[in-house]
Image (tube, helix red, strand yellow):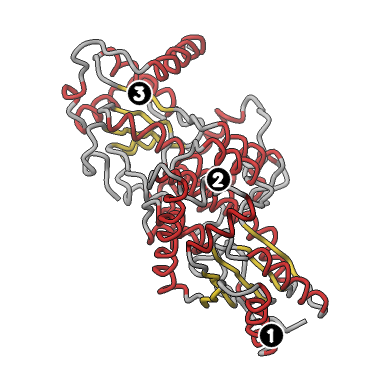
Amino acid sequence: MKTFAESNFPGRLIAVEGLDGSGKSTQVYLLKRWLEAEGIKVYFSEWNSSELVKSATSKGKKRELLTPTTFSLIHATDFADRYERHLVPLLRAGYIVLCDRYVFTAFARDVVRGCPPEWVRGNYSFACVPDLTMFFKADLEVSLNRILEGRPKLKFFEAGMDLRLSTDPYESFRIFQGRILDQYLAMSKEFNFHIMDANEQVERQQVIVRKLVSEAIDLKKFKRRSPLPLPPALQADREAMELEEDKAA
Amino acid sequence: MSKKSSHRFYGHGIPRIKPEDLGGKLIVVEGADGSGRSTQIAELVNWLETSGRPTVQVGLKRSTLVSEELKKAQEGNVLSRTTLGLFYATDFADQLENLILPALKAGFIVLADRYIYTLMARDMVRGMDEAWLKNLYGIAPIPDAVFYLTVEPEELVQRNLSKNATLDYWESGMDLGLSREVFDSFLKYQAAMHDAFRQLQKTYKFEIVDANRSVSAVNKELRKKISALIDSE
């Protein structure tokens, strides 16, 4: 599997991976703010699937119609849609694209559900691998407590209830997340993850994140010559997203 | 009903499904729109059921999970090729797990109105990698028989026009920009599909059935071959 740089894309893709509650989203957000302040052409990609794929996915989840195979395929469809419609054009246009989760999320999750690893990897092989992947490794208990302390209502598939690990959603979620963590760690060499100590202070982690990024990517090549606005369609998305982020902050 | 005969998969198969649990027969009829697939299958079902054999029928775009969305995606032509390819694979997998595999476990005869080969051929014509497709469709059980009904493209045009008075956008491959004229595009696209099938034939060994003939002549040949298959148990 080739990176975007190796495939001669002018842009670069940086992915963060880790369990929910590992603090990766905070780190990628701070990274984005820094790159923007530096005048870099950067885009933060959220899951942004088209209505059609979203409709099928949520129907499958709500009605619990999904098996490990169809769960894997519908998410691969969703990813392909995001990849072809969204990521590839930005990368062709020379953006630095930040992804909160990438194909590795699927590799870990689907294999825990029992899909053969080679089959899942093969299905995603149309996509280039990131130019930099940071894996946020927190103690399992820390991640779990962050997510579970508010006693959120866990969804059926989110808690891994389809695996029949436990009849208690919280217990099921704990076992499921533990297995996902094992899968992540098992593939960290294969995909050249930079392992981040997510138990470390947020500010200190960010210093390391920024250092890794500047070492991996020649950032001055991605500076805007002039404050070039995004295409109108994307600009609206971006403004809406920034507004939400400001609210959240 | 015949005793269990086991079905192997093309690749990795489906998690937790053992080939030895799958009996019955899986019979696939492939061919372009207008090749008489659906008519032939209806006749076969009639024949099999009156002779006391239970059947289940599957086809493309019929899954509970994604068929509605797939139809809408086609109407608007909004999905790009990898996405559409995977969406179809999801549709196939949903029917595989909910219809085909349970029916084979129960020893039924499954008649598939198109199978993975059409999906693969369509994607190949659109430039997708054959090795990628083979991995993706490694979930599929190997059928007991695959009949590929072939009809000359010119004859296909006539049949489609006499049935619908129009040529279907997708069956004409209009998304590929082969020609602005539907008529020319249809002929080019069907020729490309035929080439893709011949390419797949090398791996997947279809029985080619000449469907330029009458419905009853074709059905007679199919029955003869299927009888041999069922009686060999």
Which percent across, then down, holds residue B77?
50, 38
Q: How many marks?
A: 3
Mark 1 — on which chain does it sit? B
Mark 3 — on which chain does it sit? A
Q: Which mark is residue B227?
A: 1
Report which quarter residue A207 is drawn in.
Answer: top left
Residue type, label 3: Tyr
With respect to residue A245, does A165 lie above or below?
below
In three-dimensional space, the C-alpha distance between marks 2 and 1, rounded to whole angstroms, equals: 38 Å
B224 horizontally vs A84: left or right: right
Q: Quadrant of the N terminus of chain B?
A: bottom right
Q: Which mark is residue A43?
A: 3
Could you confirm whether marks 2 and 3 are on the same chain?
Answer: yes
Residue type, label 1: Ser
Mark 2 or 1: the one toward you: 1
Q: Residue at x 52, y 68 (%)?
A: B151
Q: Is residue B127 visible?
A: yes
> Which type of secondary structure does the marked residue at label 1 adopt?
helix
Which percent across, then down, holds residue B72?
60, 38
